[in-house]
Image (tube, helix red, strand yellow):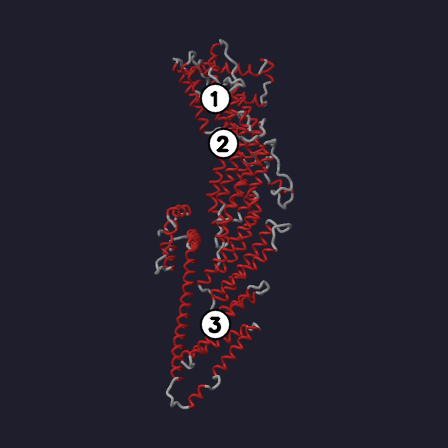
Amino acid sequence: MDFGSFSSSVEDSAEFDKDLTLSEKLKVFKPSNFDPEGYVTSRCRRMGEKEIRHLCIYLVDLRKASAEEMRKSVYSNYAAFIRTSREISDLEGQLLSLRNLLSTRANLVHGLADGVGIHSLSDGPEGSKAEDVVGLDQGPSKFENWLAQFLETLEVLLAERRVDEALAALEEGEKMAEEAEKQKSLTPSALLLSLQAAIMEKRKKLADQLAEAACQSSITIVELRSSVQALKRLGDGPRAHTLLLKTHYQKLQSNMQSLRPSGSLEGVAYTAALSQLVFSTIAQAASDSLAIFNEEPAYVSELVTWAVKQTENFALLVKRHVLDLPAASGGLRPVAESVHICFGHCSLLEARGLALSPVLLKIFRPCVERALNANLKRIEQSTAALAAADDWSLNYPPVGSRAFGTTSIGTALSSQPRLSCSAHKFNSMVQELCEDVSPLESLQLSDAALEGVIQAFNAYVNLMINALPGSTETENLEETGHKIVRMAETETQQIALLANALMLADELLPRATIKLSSSQQIYRMDEQSRRTSDKQNRLPEQRELKRRLQRMVDQLRDTFCRQHALELIFNEDGGVRLGADMYLIMDGNADEPEWFPSPIYQELFQKLTYIASIASDMFVGRERFATILLMRLTETIILWLSDDQIFWEEIENGPRPLGPFGLQQFYLDMEFVILFASQGRYLSRNLHQVIKNIIARAIEAVAASNMDPYSMLPEDDWFAEVAQIAIKMLTGKANFGSLERETGSPTASISARSASSVHSHGST
């Protein structure tokens, strides 16, 4: 396993991880002769502090992944393991019974043999001594007297339920029987059989008494432990352990009868009470089992199986009474809170060796996913409902909303974004969703939640696209599948749409989704190292998220630019305003025209100026977006002109060639665009190059008609001067008072100056 990537960078390590499976990563640690100190020394010798810290993080992650893989492997084969353990336990019990049976039969055979010997003695020769006969008729032996007293005492102890003394008496009787059997001191063997039978009978009676006492609902924990321990001392450990778990189950069921989801005890409160009851009962059962039976595999397996069953029953009960209804309606918060409480109580059992969270995960995850999907759908529906009545005016969030928290109104307003009402609703619901999902890191829903938020934002952007004028009438009809949305009629409303999308994509949504990513980036390291590694891990995720969100904002911006460009290019009746005729017909008149930018470019300049003034108020602190907006709108017009095949077909191959006046006007229009875009600081390199290519193409078209285009055009300063005067006139900053008194109009003065420049150009 090569760790050379660690000494390079975080990104190299990430790529390295993708290429290896978990088994391959762990391969280096598997040999029995693995030397940890040598491993660390060889890897860290040439590493800096940053690389060593990242190696530590990598190893911690690897340990977590290994532990999770082992847990999954255990649970995947646990049923077979439990079944095999039970079969072995049953087989051991059967072998013990068989041994007892064989021992009993052997004793019976010996007893019969002794009986036959005694009978043969009684049928001896006639000359037997009378003393021998008298000896056979003597009274009960000493052992028979002890046996009678022993049975009487044992009966009294059982009747008075003096368990410890009864156990001691039984153990004493068993000890005596074992010694007699070894020493063959009891003759006939029927006495030994009587003792053994009496012990077995009393043992069974005591065991039944203990089992009956353990099943009483009023039994305390101390009494239960005592009964189970006594039953184990009787040699019936499996029955004792099963009885222990059964008693805890009965107590659990009895206590659950008093917990009903009604009144004040419902929803999250019911879940909390029930969860505490169930997992505290499992913890008590585990404590009793380990205290009495230690960690014997058969009993531990039975305990785990029982705990898994109780956890499954509990999870299904919570799902039926608490989770199903809110999950179906999109109530993510009660679902998330309930699940979080359950996992919190369940995690406390891991210290006792009971990892029951996979059981909860299997049952709760589909329910939480359903709640998450329903909540995301509810976000879309609620936002669409508000968008149908949204006036698309930007305001601060309403006072008392979640965004203000506990801060003062003045402080909160200064830090809160201005959005329309539907955008405020979308933002608040997404914030709540991320806060609800973030505590459920064990369910690993962060990726699904993040993807759902992105899709919900995409749906909201599509709503705002439909709110732009120019959409077909059917796009706002419910029958066609589109949501009804209020139209943004004015430029102010339309730019508010862009402000909504930009603020959400650039700041609010990334800030909210940090809660989702940070919940999966917690390492057991010092606080400073954790903060540093969290920041490093979140940066790529945040960049990718912002990149995806920005693409959706770009769709809205491009739609805005395209529709405004179409308004300029086409008339209301569908006619083209930006056509070749506007330049071709200029040379049909003998008089030189008054030089001024064409009306469509005047309107473009005025529209861009107006949009810039609105954007400066709405995009405070985000002037770059306003610049890109103006740049894209200008590029849309110019690129349309550059790609209009009909326009260039008429210019280059039409019946009327482009003349001197038409070329000069075209050149002036393009220079006018370059000048106002440059002064507005939204002249991109691409836009400047496209305009230069358009001008060159027009000049080539004139040159193709056997005319010298450069002899027709004035100097470059002339175009800059006329374009600058036009900008001043269109913005109301020009002062032509003296000239107007002499010539009668501003355009006349421009025309005179233009003509003078043309004459000077021609003379040169």
Q: Secondary structure at mark 3?
A: helix
Name the residue tied to disc 2: 555
Quadrant location of the C terminus in the rendered image = top left
Residue 446 in view, yes or no: yes
Mark closest to the chain's N terminus, 2 or 3: 3
Residue 200: image tag: 3
**Between marks 3 and 1 in the image, the one whose residue lies nearer the viewer:** 3
Q: CA distance from mark 1 to mark 2?
A: 27 Å
Q: Nearer the viewer, mark 1 or mark 2?
A: 2
Q: Nearer the viewer, residue 478 or 8?
A: 478
State the residue lying farthest toward the top.
Answer: 590
Closer to the chain start, of discs 1 and 2, is 2
From what the image shows, is residue 272 above or below residue 688? below
Quick one: label 3, few (<14), some, or many (20+) residues within 10 Å?
Answer: some
The kind of residue tagged 3 is Met
- Is disc 1 placed on a helix, strand or loop? helix
Q: Residue at x 39, y 79 (%)?
A: 116
Amino acid type, callout 2 = Gln
Furthest residue to the front?
126
Q: Position of residue 555 (x, y in %)?
A: 49, 31
Residues marked 2 and 3 touching at CB (< 8 Å): no
For the residues labelled 3 and 1, the Cα–Cα distance comes to 114 Å
Residue topped by disc 1: 670
Circle 2: element type? helix
Who is closer to the viewer here, 269 or 50? Answer: 269
Relative vertical location of residue 208 with respect to residue 471 in this rendering, above or below: below
Counting residues from the N terminus, which is met first, the one under dot 3 or under dot 1?
3
Residue 441: image tag: none
Q: Nearer the viewer, residue 190 or 154?
A: 190
Q: Is residue 661 above or below residue 322?
A: above
